[in-house]
Amino acid sequence: MSVEKWLNCRLSDIRQRLDAQGHRVSKPVISRILRAHNYSLRANVKQAAGQQHPERDQQFRYIQTQRTQHAAADQPVISVDTKKKELVGNFKNAGQIWCVQAEEVDVHDFPQDAVGRAVPYGIYDLRANRGTVYIGQSADTPTFAVDNLADWCRTELRERYPHATQILIEADSGGSNGARSRVWKQQLQVQIADALGLTVTVCHYPTGTSKWNPIEHRLFSEISKTWAGCPLRSFAAVQQYIADTTTHTGLQVRAYLVTTPYATGVKVSDTEMALLNIQPHSVCPQWNYTISPRSATQVPVGWVK
């Protein structure tokens, strides 16, 4: 017999099986015997990390090196990602709140009953401990992500780092800011490097390691705590909950609503990619690259800088 055993049934079921074998035992006795042998109801535990990329540790060390270098040069370091999309309407929101009577919400979370779907794209300033969330109402596309980044650079970056010439962006490897997205890189070139004159360095976290992206545990987790148990009945409510998010370490968050519609399926040709002023790094070039501003002669005809 194996040392480890798993049994998925109620105490009453165990009692009936024992009774069928001629052992009459009460449920409290069964419970005490199980616990005496270290049996208890347990949930699955996420421990198996699966196959890891051979350059995973090297990339983490390189991200830290880049972060230190940019901070030493008084250049901004930001972490970006899209938080889980939320249905906006009279729907249940996980969590509990102190109240006399629980709020009543719809029995079902049908998308057709929703006001819309919120797409919160977050930007977290590691050095200043400040978060900014742009709440989109359309698709989560690379253009949407870079539009938000460009707005942040024109406002908050100039507010905190008026002399900045470079910026380090830490991002996941997938999604709207994925490492393989051509639109993401092309839009960074056009909207930030060329338009704002900033040298953009991007470091992506390897696949399966997004939980270590600082924005996840320093901003998004705190937002989830703020609106836990509170129905997100309107986009205004979503914005208010995000803006109200604070921590004892001084986190402050700004939230903006974005009503611009974004089309999916946008493509960038090989010719357009060849015109980008992008330089892969020698360390993990698939995840690390720098996009520099192009000169006037390098800017494609038809685009005004």
Image (spheres, grey):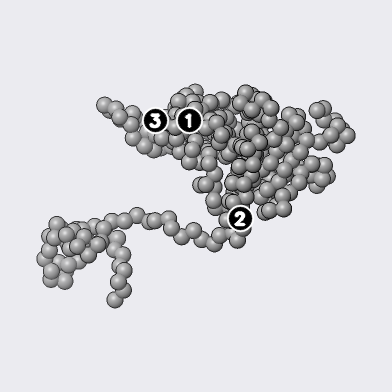
State the image coordinates of residue 76 (x, y, percent, origin top left): 63, 34
Mark number for residue 58? Answer: 2
- Specify the amino acid type for callout 3: Cys
- Mark closest to the chain's N terminus, 2 or 3: 2
81 relative to 245 in the view: left or right? right
State the image coordinates of residue 3 (x, y, percent, origin top left): 30, 71
Judging by the rendered image, the residue that carries numbered circle 1 is 251
Query: Which-is-in-front pick, marks 2 and 3?
Result: 2
Judging by the rendered image, the residue that carries numbered circle 3 is 230
Whether residue 187 can be seen here: no
State whether residue 167 is above or below residue 282. above
Q: Quadrant of the C terminus?
A: top right
Find numbered disc 2 in the image and state the secondary structure of the residue it sits on.
helix
211 vs 166, nearest the viewer = 166
Q: Label 2, label 3: how many angstroms apart (C-alpha)?
A: 41 Å
Instruction: Name the residue located 81 percent from the left edge and 36 percent from the top edge.
Output: 294
Q: Quadrant of the N terminus?
A: bottom left
Query: Which-is-in-front pick, marks 1 and 3?
Result: 1
Find numbered disc 3 in the image and state the secondary structure of the residue it sits on.
loop
